[in-house]
Amino acid sequence: MKNNILFFPSHAPNQYEALAKALKQKRNDITIKFFLLDKPYIDFAFDYTTYEELIDSCTETLPESSLNNALYNCSLNDLFLMDRIHKRGVPKRELLSKYLFSFRQYLIDNSITHVFGYALSDSITYGCYHVCQSLGIKYYYINVTRLSTLYHLSSSRSGEGEPSSLQSFSDDHIFELVDTMVDKKITPKYASDPNMVIKKSFFKVFQSAINLIYTRLKVKNKYLDFYPSVSLAIKRFINRRFSHHELIKNTYDFKKFKDKKYLFYPLHLHPETSTLVWGRWINNQYEILKLIARALPDEYVLLVKEHKVAAGRHRRGFYESISNLPNTFFIHHETNAHEIILAAKAVVTIAGTAGFEALCHNKPVLLFGDVDYKCMQNVIQCNDLSRMKEYVKNAISLKPEDIHNDKKFLDFIRLKLNGSVSLEGYSAASVDKNLIDDLVNLYIEKLS
């Protein structure tokens, strides 16, 4: 069977271009095309279409009634509310309508059999996923297994693993990875991107400003805005300093609470996949914290830790509002999350890695999102907000099962690990030959 592949990087396509070249060298039975959000500013080796071209190719005005679950498997409202890339002032609903229609036709006209994307994190990638679903095409995107440096491809909205013969992890090897993470208190490297932390040298800040100005002058896109304007960037820079000061002012040393009874909520970096896609039903973190605080018994406190790279990335007053909630306290964002999880009665999360880490520590998890580990027995899914007191009470009184005796937990992890490869130092921009070769193995396995 001929494989017609569409790559959708949703960012600078350098890595995916290198990946496509390496893939072609190993498989001569494939045709590769690209879907790009913007035209590449380099000589590009593959045929491609862009978001702008798809929109402009749709000359008719589409009635919204044509956008229904039967045809696209999603609604415009859903896409509209998770949008974070269109320019202000453009008719987003009309553009998304034309995009879904034209993209679907493009997949049919080119007999696309596989779509390989980077993520599910905004209106365009999420729309792509649903169009593929409606046509019976698998949309694969890369996921970290949350253990070591292992990554896998998933075609599930919640990021689940799939049957694979790429590797064969034994029970002992799986628990060695789990126990190593727990014993050594290993936190994922992707949560500490040095380019996003607030403490950067003046040179780094100056360099970022120059790059932004250069990019704004170079990029000309009618519909999408990949980078903030210079004035908005300056406003955000100033706001972040004030917001960070507000966070520090309301932050306590974790040692103060070690002997207290507490629930732990690590703030998510927002917007991202775990909030926009996995937490699409509720991702307002202040409202979630308010719900938990209201349901918390008087002898308990709620400890909150900011995401390392998100410190100060909120409007002024955000941290103050959370600190004013009853028995709610910020712990310094540099505190190792495992230290806090160890003594917590339960961990609260939308869909974050901390929820999985809590399971590995045999702790209950209050889960608000739709993520792969939702089916584990120590997870309490918070689907009915009117039952929050009941959920909190159940979490506090729950005597968790030891994961070492839980075959379901073991099989859940194995499903992801067996379809994974180790990508040390992985980033979306890396074109290191060894990393590309490892990625190729992931993609080849998904082809028929």
Image: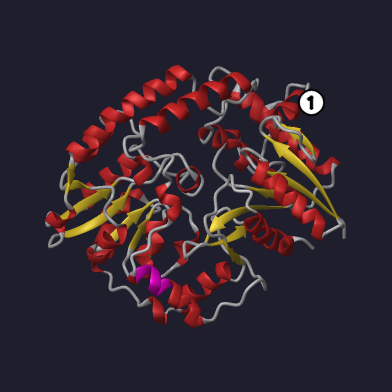
Q: Is residue 239 above or below residue 117?
A: above
Residue at (67%, 42%) from the top-left corner? 14
Q: Secondary structure at mark 1?
A: helix
Looking at the image, the residue that sits furthest to the front is 203
Pick the quarter of the image with the C terminus.
bottom right
Seen from the viewer's position, the closer of residues 209 and 131 is 209
Seen from the viewer's position, the closer of residues 197 and 351 is 197
Q: Is residue 340 above or below residue 274?
A: below
Residue 374 pos. (x, y %): 45, 61
Instruction: Tell me how the rendering is colored.
Output: secondary structure
Residue at (34%, 49%) from the top-left corner? 385
Q: Quadrant for residue 281, please give it.
A: top left
Q: Is residue 3 left or right of residue 435?
A: right
Residue at (72%, 45%) from the top-left corner? 17
Give amino acid for label 1. Ser
Q: Is residue 328 left or right of residue 404?
A: left
**Classed neighbour count for the residue bearing mark 1: other residues with Cα under 10 Å, few (<14), some (14–19), many (≥20):** few
Q: Is residue 213 above or below residue 430?
A: above
Q: Is residue 223 above or below residue 48?
A: above
Residue 416 pos. (x, y %): 56, 67
Residue 69 showing in the rendered view: no
Residue at (29%, 29%) from the top-left corner? 241
Residue 258 showing in the rendered view: yes
Q: Dominant secondary structure of the magenta stretch?
A: helix
Q: Which residues are magenta?
A: 178-182
- For disc 1, the marked residue is 57
> Residue 432: within the magenta?
no
Seen from the viewer's position, the closer of residues 144 and 26 is 26
